[in-house]
Image: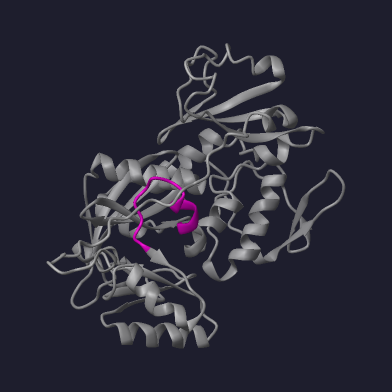
Amino acid sequence: MEAAETKGLEVKIRDPLRFAIDMEEGEPDLLYRNKTIEIPDAILPRVGTSITRYGTTVVRQFEQMDVYTPNTAAGIGNSRDKLKSLQILSRHDIGIPRTAYVSHKNDVSDAIDRVGGTPVIIKLIEGTQGVGVILADKPEIAKAIIETLHSANQNVLIQKFVAESKGKDVRAFVINDRVVAAMRRTAQGQEFRSNVHRGGLATAIDLDPVYEKAAVRAAQIMGLKVCGVDMLEGKDGPQIMEINSSPGLEGIEGATGLDIAGEVINFICDQADLPDIDLRQRLTVSRGYGVADIFIPEGSAFVGQTIEQTGLREQDVVVLTLKRGDSVISNPKSSRVLEAHDVLLCYGKVETMKSMIKDRPKRRRKLKPLPATPVTEGTTLDEATS
């Protein structure tokens, strides 16, 4: 609020729980304390974890009223649920700690083994500032904790303990596809959680480009324009631990000396006239039209052709983005040459696109190396292969 007022902006802080949502044909609306509101140019959601559901509903209503928000209701909801966020990230080539989620007590032991055995991290699915994060160093202790939490109707994640990052992590503050500040948080004493709210020591760092890229990609995947991305420093590179849609400012501004609040306000002012559009919501209104991913397999007639040469436009199909590896090219030029394994996000006639995605490959499980089994003289083939 101080940063916005410094720039001459009028700011109002509103309790999400006091909004009432009104809906009628063609006219989504909001009331505050039962009074009609003046529609703002933009909002900045700071939704507490205890009111996530109602808070995101209010944010979604502002979106339907074409009010700009850097973090959409979907993005906040995706990031707030630890299980959902990891499910979304796991689809992409981005580092995350090995994680398991089970419901039945008979599945707990195998889940612990699959993530690498003890010590293991046990996390409540919804938690913040380190609350609901437990380190268990023995299998029987881990099982007892999980079974106790399950009996209290608490859903938990079982996560690999990244030993080389014990007691420390990296927080990258992302605004509009770039990292504007970064700090390393280090736990003090016997505490393994490095959160500043738990006494962790914050120091400014120059973020390695690999970590910067991972933070920005994680924010993009979640659909957040302003967020804090927490990463563990694993031996194989960054491991995304959590994406915070309402990141605190005190710790990182104090550590870096940067005016991050001012950066957030500058970005919102720059984007206020361009509210996000849900493409699938807006573009599928026309009968017979929709949005689809089109995969270009090896041997496709499209390989080596430009987008113009494919004739898609003549078939009433427009290419919105082109995904190649871990890069996404928005609004690709018609002269862009297509390669095998490219993925085109297209809008157009559904029947035309359906005929083009018949070769879409199934996602296959990555093969993991098995531990070597020493074979001695007298060992049978069956024994060796088992």
Q: Residue furthest right?
A: 25
Left or right placement of residue 131 versus residue 311 in this view: left
Instruction: Report the quarter where the C terminus lies.
Output: bottom left
- Residue 82 vs 132, above or below: the answer is above
* Image location (x, y in percent) of residue 40: 65, 45
Numbered circles on residues, count = 0
Q: Where does residue 185 sit, x and y in percent of width and height?
A: 25, 61
Report the residue at 39% width, 65% height from top. 99
**Magenta span covers which residues?**
86-98
Can residue 131 be seen in the rendering of this structure?
yes
Coordinates of residue 161 in the picture (x, y in percent): 28, 68
Instruction: Classify 186 as above or below 210.
Output: below
For the point 58% across and 65% down, the residue is: 52
Vertical relation: 307 (above or below) 260: above
Q: Tell me where residue 282 appears, x and y as whole percent.
A: 72, 37
Q: Residue furthest left?
A: 377
Residue at the location (86% across, 51% down)? 24
User: Would you say residue 14 sits in the magenta stretch?
Assistant: no
Is 97 part of what is drawn in magenta? Answer: yes
Would you say the magenta stretch is mainly helix, strand or loop? loop
State the residue in front, 370 or 107.
370
Q: In this view, does 10 lie above or below 312?
A: below
Colouring style = one colour
Q: Where, by quadrant of the figure, is residue 184 drawn?
A: bottom left
Residue 122 can be seen, yes or no: no
The part of the image, by quadrant, that contains residue 292 is top right
